[in-house]
Amino acid sequence: MKQTIVFYDNSCPICIGVTGWLRRIDHQKQFLLEPYQNSEILKKYPQIIPADCEKQIHIINEKNEVVRGADAMFEIWRKTDHWSRFIPVFLQLPPFIWIARPIYRLIANNRKSIYS
């Protein structure tokens, strides 16, 4: 099974919390969690731009597609073994996704000040 690679901000308390939660529930080892600040890892993935990762989470899924922001979070959530994994299926449908994306951007843009 090919892992989904999650590029997150290792200086962000929210990102660290989410990836810690993901590590605890990822019993099938579906995710490879990498801070985007790791330049050695980024050399392997030229499609990942650090300046973009600074703004929002990025993943490379099993189809080798780059997915960002709220869409990435929902894809991660759907792939977990958590009991709530069915919820993102609905949240990715209109009109919910139209609301989820700007809410994600608002939180992402202010994430360091939220938990400082």
Image (cartoon, rainbow, N blue to C red):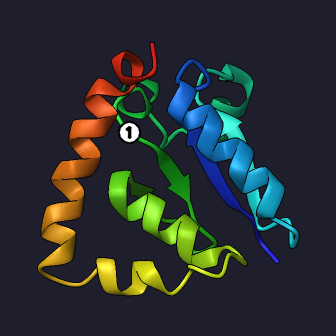
Identify the secondary structure beneath mark 1.
Answer: loop
What is the residue that sits farthest to the top in this orientation?
116
Residue occupied by mark 1: 56
Quarter assignment of residue 95: bottom left
Left/right of residue 12 with respect to residue 56 in the rendered view: right
Image height of 27 relative to 108, above or below: below
Front in this rendered view, residue 53 or 96: 96
Quarter assignment of residue 101: bottom left
| Residue 70 seen anywhere in this rendered image of the structure | yes
Find residue 5 and report its horizontal and vertical position in percent.
66, 54
Find residue 81 and report its horizontal and vertical position in percent.
73, 78
Find residue 91 and report its horizontal and vertical position in percent.
31, 77
> 10 Å neighbourhood of mark 1: few (<14), some, or many (≥20)?
many
Name the quadrant of the C terminus: top left
What is the total number of numbered labels drawn onto the structure image?
A: 1
Find residue 48 and report its horizontal and vertical position in percent.
49, 40
Front in this rendered view, residue 107 or 34: 107
At 68% from the left edge and 23% from the top edge, which residue is drawn? 38
Image height of 52 relative to 112, above or below: below
At 71% from the left edge and 33% from the top edge, which residue is drawn? 41
Q: Amino acid at mark 1?
A: Gln
At 82% from the left edge and 78% from the top edge, which residue is drawn? 1
Left/right of residue 98 with respect to residue 31 in the rendered view: left
At 50% from the left edge and 70% from the top edge, which residue is drawn? 75
